Amino acid sequence: MMYNEQRVQEVKPKMVVINIIRNKLDARIFSTVKRGTPYVELNQFAA
């Protein structure tokens, strides 16, 4: 949600922000399927 708010504050139209987020999700989904591994949330490993 923070990413969405940050982009909207940059005065980007909401649909542009939604498309950016869609593209990010699509890339993660397809790369996970291509590798054949489960998705791992990396934020939980951050210090």
Image: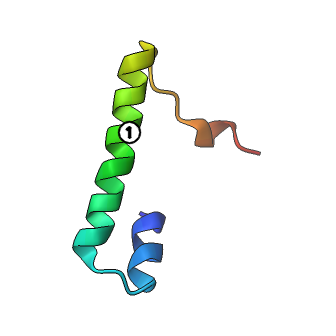
- Residue 9 versus residue 35 in the image, above or below: below
Q: Amino acid at mark 1?
A: Ala
Q: Residue at x 27, y 60 (%)?
A: 19
| Corner quadrant of residue 21 | bottom left
Secondary element at tag 1? helix
| Corner quadrant of residue 34 | top left
- Residue 27 versus residue 14 in the image, above or below: above
Location of residue 43 in the rendering, given as x and y in whole percent from the top left corner: 60, 43
Colour mode of the rendering? rainbow
Q: Residue furthest right?
A: 47
Location of residue 41 in the rendering, given as x and y in whole percent from the top left corner: 53, 35
Q: Residue furthest top?
A: 36
Q: Residue at x 68, y 36 (%)?
A: 45
Q: Residue at x 35, y 32 (%)?
A: 29
- Residue 34 versus residue 40 in the image, above or below: above
Other residues around mark 1 within 10 Å, as few (<14) / some (14–19) / many (≥20): few
Q: Residue at x 29, y 52 (%)?
A: 22
Residue under numbered circle 1? 27
Marks counted in the figure total 1
Closer to us: 30 or 39: 30
Quarter of the picture holding the N terminus = bottom left
Location of residue 7 in the rendering, given as x and y in whole percent from the top left corner: 43, 74
Quarter of the picture holding the C terminus = top right
- Residue 2 versus residue 9 in the image, above or below: above
